[in-house]
């Protein structure tokens, strides 16, 4: 065999190697996840309340994030308010964003604590934080943690 017979194989191997470097899962930046909306889901009982939550997920990477699931917790005024999981698949475009609708569960005691805090300090500026993990399809089933905080506008 001649050396020129291996040239197409070498070119193919180099292309595969370079494409693997471009989508290296270890270089993915965590997404920016903020609270876009929260509304009662209609399922309210004495022990549990459910809410429909819309999360805005922004992808700072130049590669699509193929999300196969998410786990998250929402805190209000530095106290955990609700948590949830979702196995809904969504694709967050490269350098783009997507609204992800999820459901969270909380207890009525969580709301009572929040109301008590507002009554004790009417000038209080409510804040929130969202933390959790995005589970990616492919990328070696990588998990991207996220944590964001913000204030509610008056």
Image: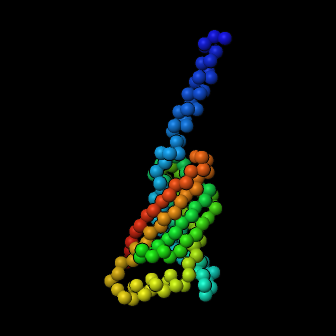
Q: Position of residue 83 (x, y in %)?
A: 55, 71
Q: Is residue 99 above or below residue 44?
A: above
Quarter residue 84 falls in: bottom right
Residue placed farthest to the right in the image?
1
Residue placed farthest to the left in the image?
123
Total marks shown come to 0
User: Is residue 58 visible from the viewing direction of this image?
Assistant: no
Q: Position of residue 41 (x, y in %)?
A: 60, 78
Residue at point 58% right, 76% down? 105
For this view, does 122 lie left or right of residue 74?
left
Q: Is residue 45 above or below residue 19?
A: below
User: Is residue 147 visible from the viewing direction of this image?
Assistant: yes
Q: Nearer the viewer, residue 154 or 2?
A: 2
Residue at point 49% right, 48% down? 28
For this view, does 2 lie left or right of residue 120?
right
Q: Position of residue 122 (x, y in %)?
A: 35, 86
> Which quadrant holds the N terminus?
top right
> Which quadrant holds the C terminus?
bottom left
Q: Position of residue 114 (x, y in %)?
A: 45, 83
Q: Nearer the viewer, residue 53 or 140?
A: 140
Residue placed farthest to the top in the image?
2
Residue at point 62% right, 18% down? 6
Colour scheme of the picture: rainbow
Residue at point 48% right, 86% down? 112
Q: Is residue 126 above or below residue 9?
A: below
């Amino acid at each position: 065999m001649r050396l020129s017979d291996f040239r197409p194989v070498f070119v193919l191997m180099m292309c595969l190697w370079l494409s693997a470097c471009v989508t290296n899962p270890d270089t993915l930046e965590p997404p920016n996840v903020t609270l876009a909306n929260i509304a009662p889901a209609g399922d309210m009982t004495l022990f549990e309340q459910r809410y429909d939550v819309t999360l805005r997920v922004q992808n700072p990477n130049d590669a699509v994030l193929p999300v196969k699931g998410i786990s998250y917790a929402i805190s209000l005024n530095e106290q955990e308010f609700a948590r949830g999981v979702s196995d809904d698949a969504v694709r967050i475009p490269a350098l783009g964003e997507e609204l992800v609708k999820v459901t969270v569960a909380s207890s009525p005691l969580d709301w009572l604590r929040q109301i008590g805090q507002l009554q004790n300090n009417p000038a209080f500026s409510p804040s929130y934080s969202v933390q959790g993990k995005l589970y990616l399809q492919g990328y070696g089933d990588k998990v991207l943690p996220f944590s964001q905080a913000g204030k509610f506008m008056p």
